[in-house]
Image (cartoon, rainbow, N blue to C red):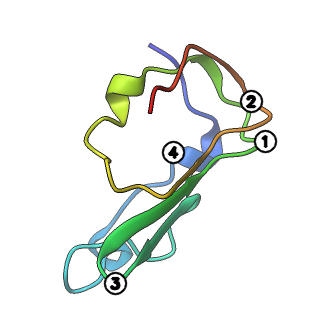
Amino acid sequence: MQTLPGKFLSPVDSKSFDSDGFPLNWFSIACSNGRLTSITVNDAGLVGEFSSSAITGLKMLPNLSVSNNQLTGTISK
């Protein structure tokens, strides 16, 4: 198990979601029209093995950016 850097560990409360249950102003997460559109964690100090199984349910995710971290593993299309 890997430990996430502190900026990812902020508590989440009910004010962090819109009326449809989608995140509002979450660090590194973007949504539009009720859909997840981007996960961007560049230069975030992430270290460890990236498991593509962690994102297999996100088939319609147009942008995933993890550059300048120390991740190993592969992401298949």
The Cα–Cα distance between marks 2 and 1, rounded to whole angstroms, is 6 Å
Q: Which residue is mark 1?
A: 43
- Are circles 4 and 1 on residues that touch, CB within 8 Å? no
Q: Quadrant of residue 42?
A: top right
**Residue situated in front as seen by the camera: 34 or 77:** 77
The Cα–Cα distance between marks 4 and 1, rounded to whole angstroms, is 16 Å
Helix, strand or loop at mark 3 = loop
- Are circles 1 and 3 on residues that touch, CB within 8 Å? no
The Cα–Cα distance between marks 2 and 4, rounded to whole angstroms, is 17 Å
**Residue 68 point in image, percent of width and height:** 80, 34
Up-down relation of residue 16 to residue 58 (above or below): below
Looking at marks 1 and 3 on the same chain, the residue that comes earlier in the sequence is marked by 3
Looking at marks 2 and 4 on the same chain, the residue that comes earlier in the sequence is marked by 4
Q: Which residue is mark 2?
A: 69
Quadrant for the C terminus, please: top left
Q: Quadrant of residue 28?
A: bottom right
Which residue corresponds to the image point at 29% horizontal and 83% vertical from the top-left? 18
Looking at marks 4 and 3 on the same chain, the residue that comes earlier in the sequence is marked by 4
Amino acid at dot 1: Asp
Amino acid at dot 3: Asn
Of badges 2 and 3, nearer the viewer stands: 3
Up-down relation of residue 33 to residue 8 (above or below): below
The Cα–Cα distance between marks 2 and 3, rounded to whole angstroms, is 30 Å
Amino acid at dot 4: Leu
Of badges 2 and 4, nearer the viewer stands: 2
Which residue corresponds to the image point at 52% horizontal and 61% vertical from the top-left? 38
Helix, strand or loop at mark 2 = loop
- The disc placed on residue 9 is 4
Left or right of 43 on screen, residue 18: left
Quadrant for the N terminus, please: top left
Q: Which residue is mark 3?
A: 33
Residue projecting furthest to the left? 20
